[in-house]
Image: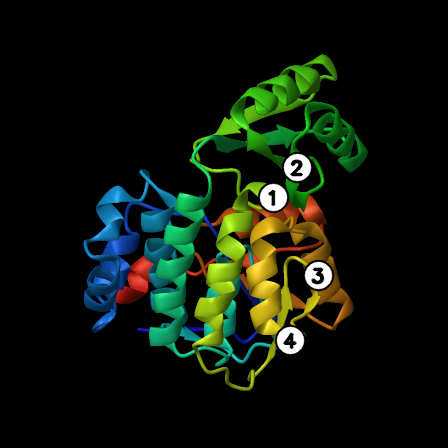
Amino acid sequence: MTFTIDSPSPAVLFPGQGSQTPEMRDLVAATPGLLESCVELVGEDPFARVEESTRFAQPAIFCASMAAWSRLDVRPRAAAGHSLGELAALTAAGVFSLDDALRLVVVRGRLMAGADDSGSMLALVGGEPADAAEIAAAAGVTVANDNAPGQVVLSGDRDRLAQAEEAARERGIRALALDVAGAFHSPAMAPAVEPFRAALDEVQLGEPRFEVFSCATAAPFADVRDELASALVRPVRWRETVLALGEAGVESYVDVGPGKVLARLMKRISAGLKAQSPDFQEAAGV
């Protein structure tokens, strides 16, 4: 069973970490060969350990996205991915083969897990971007994700994030510590950049079948290898990316998943934006 999307000028959106669902392994297992390839490259089944480390979460979520994509009948005008989701978006567009992309995701997860074990991330709910920037600067941490109005994520050393959390609460901004083992999208990821770029240099790139927007630049990819590697230390500009898709002529959106994280963010970015979230579990009969 496939889902047909007949909305005009759709953009397909692929999520990053934090989008995992309990059922996503079943969807991957129902996709011929995908789970077996994932287990072989990771060295074990990553789905049972998604919550433990980014090196397990990344390949599991990527495979779930690609399993869902394989069940989607759509002619996208464009695509975008949130952090890890960029590799899924580029694969959907034909820039990477599925095998190459999965290898890259496994490498990316391992490199990011090894780059930093003393950092974490803190979500600020409420307030303005200027508030988040001031809090981050004062605490010596980084604005890692601008997801939507009222949802910004900081990244850095745990002790400094505790200072940022206190400062946020003094301003009446809700602060939520994220259960991640690393200061992602911050300078702490610098050790991962060069080896990930080397891994990217080893794969062949195809011509994209549709435009893919980078969430680090909020514009179509100009240099896939450079931008994917440098994105490890650059903030995710998701709010700007979604708005840029609209300016490029996108009229509808599909959250490929897993989960519905991006669909929920759409409503925060603009009241007029809405993303379809097909039930791919039902489509797979799982």
Quarter of the image with the N terminus is bottom left
- For the residues carrying marks 2 and 3, which lies nearer the camera in this image? 2
Give the CA separation, mark 2 to mark 3: 19 Å
The first of marks 4 and 1 along the sequence is: 4
Nearest to the observer: residue 119 or residue 239: 119
Contact between marks 2 and 3 (CB within 8 A): the answer is no
Which quadrant holds the C terminus?
bottom left
**Residue depicted at 67% across the width and 55% down the height:** 273
Label 1's element?
A: helix
Label 4 sits on a secondary structure element that is: loop
| Dot 4 amino acid type | Ser
Q: Is residue 240 left or right of residue 89?
A: right
Give the number of the disc on residue 187. Answer: 1
Label disc, if present, on residue 142 of the rendered structure: 2
Return the residue at label 3.
218
- Residue 130's place in the image compared with 281, above or below, is above
Q: Do callouts 2 and 1 mark residues in contact (Cβ within 8 Å)?
A: yes
Q: State how many labels appear.
A: 4
Query: Which residue lies under the disc numbered 4?
Result: 9
Residue 34 drawn at (x, y percent): 25, 69
Q: Position of residue 103 (x, y in %)?
A: 35, 67
Proximity of marks 4 and 3: CB atoms separated by less than 8 Å: no
